[in-house]
Amino acid sequence: MKCTISQDITAGVDLIRAGELVAFATETVYGLGANALDSEAVARIFEVKQRPHFDPLIVHISNVNQLDQLTLGLSKQAEKLAEQFWPGPLTLVVPKTEVVPDLVTSGLGSVAIRIPAHPIARQLLEATKLPIAAPSANKFGCLSPTLAQHVEEQLGNEIKLILDGGPCSVGVESTVIQCIDEIPVLLRPGGISLEEIEACIGRVRIAKIEDHAEVKSPESPGMLPKHYAPRARLVIADKLDQLPAKGVNGLLSLYPLEETFLKGSQFSAQEILSPAGDLRVAAAKLFTALRNLDSAGVENIVALRMPEKGLGRTINNRLDRAAES
Ligand code: AMP
Ligand code: MG
């Protein structure tokens, strides 16, 4: 199949309406989209991604008016979050209507919904007038794509169109919050920080990665411990004195490290996420940096843990899951 990379929204609309897949830019990562109301089209997403069917998809919409069709209503907290963070990198898990196919939600009684901010995603959603189910446009478990070229590398033979919107500005997936019970649950840290969420609605419960293992988690079945993995083995160092002394390693850190720390260690490649220590900038660079280290051919990637605040939490979550064996 010949894959086109373009900004031709009309071509994207035609494909989505015909029940085909389209990869498209969002501010988080590139998505692999299909008409969320068409089970056959949605089934193709799982097939192309090789994604297990127990991992439910996020449904993207352009407008809160579409909520009535898809959800049984939003709780007070969900409404507050939607008002403050939509359009943007926030996904709300809320009770669903029968219109949403079981395949999209892995048979759960809830659906994950997001209104993205990226103009390409918005134009596609507005022009199709359809809800679009879209996970990240990569093979299951691999690094998420933050450039059209990343999508082409992995899925270029299986899809017809990638709607190019340049590099993703947020660069990590959306924050997923379940708003069903009285106390909302943070299912996945993402582009909106926990601090921002709690400033909006007060305390939330944080689901632990261990809770997410397939068998244990009716709450969020798709959140497997191992995910977002580069090809190289990833090892996390909590402190500088834990840097390994030998090996063909790549180093991933927030700041540039001083020579004294690097002395005696052998790193053939190094990626610095933000010399100024800005965790938002670091998150936006994370997946590209991991790809670069893979391309450099290192066997191991040593990642220095980020400060556990703001988007540092999101980065640490992705690193922890990339490091799982
Ligand atoms: P992705 O599409 O890869 O960004 O992942 C979306 C994630 O959101 C899934 O892996 C699920 O863990 C979570 N999710 C989606 N829908 C639901 C739902 N109805 N209930 C709980 N978690 C969900
Ligand atoms: Mg994904």
Image: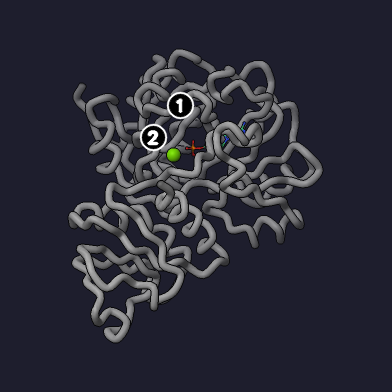
Q: Which mark is residue 140?
A: 2
Label 1 crowd (10 A; few <14 / some 14-19 / many >=20): few
Residue 196 percent across, percent down from the top left = 64, 60
The amino acid type, in three-letter code, at marker 2 is Phe
**Of 173 and 221, the residue lying toward us:** 221
Q: Quadrant of ligand 1?
A: top right
**Of 295 and 122, the residue lying toward us:** 295
Does the closest atom of ligand 2 sit within 8 Å of the Cβ of label 2? yes
Which residue corresponds to mark 1? 52
Indicate the colouring scheme. one colour
Residue 163 percent across, percent down from the top left = 33, 36
Residue 217 percent across, percent down from the top left = 62, 35
Q: Under tag 2, what secondary structure?
A: loop
Q: Which mark is residue 147?
A: none
Examine the image and state in which quarter residue 135 appears.
top left
Q: Is residue 245 left or right of residue 44?
A: left
| Residue at (34% x, 72% y) in the render | 243
Report the label total. Answer: 2
Does the closest atom of ligand 1 sit within 8 Å of the Cβ of label 1? no
Q: Of callouts 1 and 2, which one flags the residue occurring earlier in the amino acid sequence?
A: 1
The answer to whether mark 1 and mark 2 are in CB contact below 8 A is: yes
CA separation, marks 1 and 2? 8 Å
